[in-house]
Image (cartoon, rainbow, N blue to C red):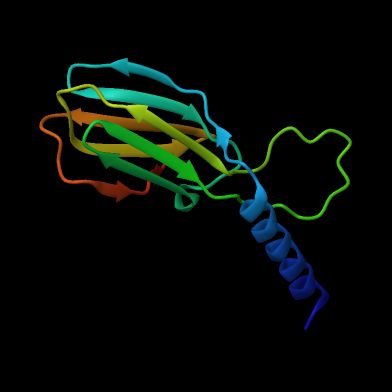
């Protein structure tokens, strides 16, 4: 095993332990309506589209991102993690016909399309 592989295993183990024990970080959002969609904008720094899951159920939108990396560090101040984000939002009546999402420059943009609420489903955002 090389030093790089050993370091990767240490970081992977530290990340898994941190994610197992941490409380998810609540994400602030901006929400507004357009002609065809309810738009949700949320900051998700330091995660990639594959880290994020978006669930739409009738009346509820939920998104979260897994912890990206949590190598052992001796922090002087440690107020946030690279992931472990989660948020649930009530979806008004008349929205739920579908979902589109992108993640670019640390900003998640979700469009909940107008229409009758479909069966529950999950998506991953596209990279911007």
Residue 37: give x, y in percent of width and height. Answer: 22, 24
Task: Please determine whether, in this image, residue 120 is positioned above or below residue 43.
Answer: below
Q: Nearer the viewer, residue 55 or 41?
A: 55
Q: Residue 87, position in %: x, y? A: 46, 33
> Splitting the image into 4 quarters, where does residue 96 fall?
top left
Q: Position of residue 108 (x, y in %)?
A: 44, 34
Q: Residue at x 42, y 25 (%)?
A: 41
Using the image as rendered, state which of residue 11 and residue 105 is in the foreground. 11
* Residue plotted at (69% across, 53% down): 18
| Quadrant position of the C terminus in the picture | top left
Query: Is 38 positioned to the left or the right of 43 in the image?
Result: left
- Residue 86 shown left or right of residue 126 in the figure: right
The quarter of the displayed image where residue 77 is located: top right
| Residue 128 in view of the camera | no
- The structure residue drawn at horizontal position 70% and vertical position 65%, both measured from the top left corner, is 13
- For the N terminus, the quadrant is bottom right
> Closer to the camera, 106 or 27?
27
Q: Is residue 64 above or below residue 79?
A: below
Locate residue 72 relative to residue 123 in the image: left or right: right
Residue 49: % across, % down? 46, 47
Is 95 on the left or on the right of 126, as rendered?
Answer: left
Q: Nearer the viewer, residue 26 or 32?
A: 26
Residue 120 visible to an observer of this rendering: yes
The furthest residue to the left: 116
Q: How many numbered discs? A: 0
Residue at 65 percent of width and 60 percent of height: 16
Residue sitting at the far bottom: 1
């Amino acid at each position: 095993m090389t030093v790089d592989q050993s370091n990767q295993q240490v970081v992977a183990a530290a990340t898994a332990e941190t994610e197992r024990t941490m409380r998810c970080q609540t994400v602030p959002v901006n929400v507004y309506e357009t002609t065809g969609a309810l738009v949700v904008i949320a900051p998700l720094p330091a995660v990639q589209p594959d880290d994020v899951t978006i669930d739409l159920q009738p009346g509820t939108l939920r998104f979260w991102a897994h912890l990206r990396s949590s190598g052992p560090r001796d922090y002087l101040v440690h107020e946030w993690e690279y992931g472990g984000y989660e948020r649930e939002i009530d979806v008004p009546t008349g929205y739920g016909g579908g979902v589109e999402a992108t993640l670019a420059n640390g900003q998640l943009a979700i469009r909940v399309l107008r229409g009758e609420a479909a069966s529950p489903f999950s998506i991953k955002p596209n990279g911007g």
